[in-house]
Image (cartoon, helix red, strand yellow):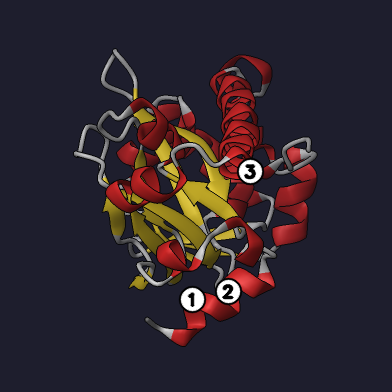
Amino acid sequence: MDPRVIDYLKQFQLMELFPPGVTQEMTLATFKNGERLFSQDDEAHILYFLVKGKLKISMLSPEGKRLILAFKTPFDIVGDIEYVRNCPFINTVEAVTDIEVIGISHHILRKQLNENAAWLQFLLRTITQKFESKSRAMNFNLLYTVDVRVASYLHSMTPTQPVLDSTSLVDMADLIGTSYRHLNRVLRQFEEAGWLVKKRGKITLLDRKALLAQAGQNIYEQEERK
């Protein structure tokens, strides 16, 4: 077992939650910026703990539009709902930065922890927080104007560097729940304000503070209530 697994479990105060029979089966995996951990409807066999980096969680609506549900930073669990329901992945999860996750198979968890009260309470707490977060995210398109959603999206997608690929503006429009035309109009407004430059397939942020001020808060990264 990678010794960094133990280091991360200690860092996030999880050592007492898992017996040795579980920790010794855990693996540490890395994903590059832009790489998908899995897609919606993929078979789910592994539970992931996000311990480093940043993830984007999205879903495909019944109308075929992909919508952002949240951005996640450590510590967070990925695939817990699927583990409990024993179903395929309900969302698509993609790395926004280079990330590290600890993986553990559903089989091991069910074998070792299926009747463990502390583990079940831990799952209940995290899952209820996620349903609250998802409900809030699904209302963003009604509660917030497009300029707020665009500003928040740009801020969330550039945590370590100010440049974002603009070649997939159609996808960006779908993710924040607006039209391609409306998105371009907002980007032009931001460019005229001196907050960004859109050139040669790239969006370069010039004033992150102004974008965050425009958003009022980062709506995709509101901290969940504990």
| Residue 116 in view of the camera | yes
Q: Which residue is disc 1 drawn over?
A: 5
**Cα gap from disc 2 to disc 3, whole angstroms:** 19 Å
Name the kind of residue labelled 1 in the image. Val
SS for tag 2?
Answer: helix
Q: Which residue is disc 2 drawn over?
A: 8
Q: Residue at x 69, y 51 (%)?
A: 193
SS for tag 3?
Answer: helix
The vertical placement of 203 against 184, above or below, is below
Q: In which quadrant of the rendered image does the C terminus lie?
A: top right
List x then y, in percent, for residue 44: 26, 41
Residues marked 2 and 1 touching at CB (< 8 Å): yes
**Cα gap from disc 2 to disc 1, whole angstroms:** 5 Å
The vertical placement of 47 against 171, above or below, is below
List x then y, in percent, for residue 70: 54, 40
The vertical placement of 178 against 46, above or below, is above
Q: Which residue is disc 3 drawn over?
A: 118
**Cα gap from disc 3 to disc 1, whole angstroms:** 20 Å
Name the kind of residue labelled 2 in the image. Tyr
Q: Residue at x 22, y 32 (%)?
A: 41
